[in-house]
Amino acid sequence: MVIAKKFRTNVFYAAMSMITFYSHCLAAQETGIAYTSEFQTDFRKGAKWVNLLRAEFEFPIGKNFGMEMASISIAETHERPLIDDWQGFSNIEEENTPLALAVLGIRWQLKKSFLFVGVRNLNEDYFTSPYTSLFTNSSCGIFPTLSVNYPIANYPLASIGIDYKYKGNRWSFEASAYNGVGYKRLTGRENVFRFCPESDGILGISTINYQNNGSSYYMGFALRNGMSACYEKGTEESKEKKEWNALVWGYAEQNLSAHWHALIQYSVNPTVLKGCRSYAGGALVLHCGKLESGVFAGYAGFAEGNEWSGELTCRIACRHNMYIQPAFHVIKNSRVHGCIGLLRLGYEIRKP
């Protein structure tokens, strides 16, 4: 009863926050609200319900300039994980968050170039290709060689940064710089508007993409200095936290036929002493009308051991703004070997 009451309270506050935010956005040129609900089970005694609500808007403020804003709210029945995995089988599961900023800043556009300055979550721009976005596991949303090792502006956190994009016909390029630590509070010392390279460090990230005949190829790298996630809550001094750390990644989405597609991913971080040093994944995707399904297998090499994961999922579009997506996960590391089932429902409203 206590858990249910607490969950209802979190949902209420999240819903009221988002309704208030959305009501102020109705006058904007483009607004949107997206709701994702996910039921999780370990097929034994464990179950969990996770909800994500996102609102966003864009508003022109002059020639070639505009304002962007997006917020998120997260509510779940409890914060205990169903399985002791290292990567995270769900890319929306996080602790209860009534309201947090994902985007808030100014956008400038000139022909094929785009520049953004303000608060931003790096998930807005990186690892967002169509077939990586199909799968529900966290590592398809952002590689663990980056997300596990550093307390950066990764969902649900954000930080002050600058992002530049160039979008050509086939080639595109993107480069960003963020405060080295991400936050989600709106007030206090640790807020999303904080910019302190001396203590938080700096994160630089860049990628180059090539697209041709429906296939896409991505190469990227990241540089970061400052404290790693392994030391962020402690006082232990290390050589690692005082130097620049680097990682590289690449992935490809290759068309095999009109309906079949392949996904290959790889990333390595040779500079970390703890955390995730390497990651590899592969998938086969079938796209047929309103049905999109895929099977994925991944490997992540951690300092304390290796984790293998697999996912089988199917996303069914219902009308033009709703989908249902069941998923089945298999996870194995040195601590656990188990299965997780998900049932996800998504609904989106957009006002041009």
Image (cartoon, rainbow, N blue to C red):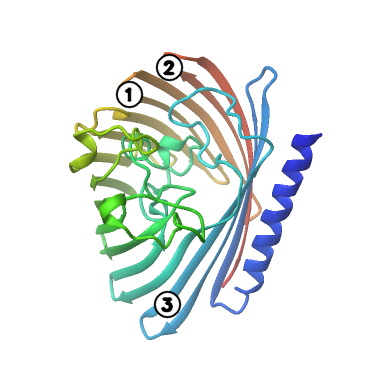
Give the quarter of the figure containing the N terminus: top right
Q: Is residue 111 above or below residue 163?
A: below
Q: Is residue 241 left or right of residue 68?
A: left
What residue type is disc 3 on? Answer: Gly
Element assignment for label 3: strand
What residue type is disc 1 on? Answer: Phe
Q: Which residue is mark 3?
A: 66
Q: As rendered, which of 268 and 328 lies closer to the eye?
A: 268
Q: Position of residue 277 (x, y in %)?
A: 27, 29
Element assignment for label 2: loop
Quarter-of-image position of residue 258: top left
Binning the other alpha carbons within 10 Å of mark 3 as few (below 14), some (14 to 19) or many (20 upward) gives: some
Asked if the residue at tag 2 contacts the one at tag 3, i.e. Cβ–Cβ closer than 8 Å, the answer is: no
Q: Is residue 212 visible?
A: no
Q: What residue occupies the far front of the structure in this picture? A: 235
Earlier sequence position, callout 3 versus callout 1: 3
Element assignment for label 1: strand
Q: Which residue is mark 2?
A: 333
Q: Which residue is mark 1?
A: 302
Q: What residue occupies the far bottom of the structure in this picture? A: 62
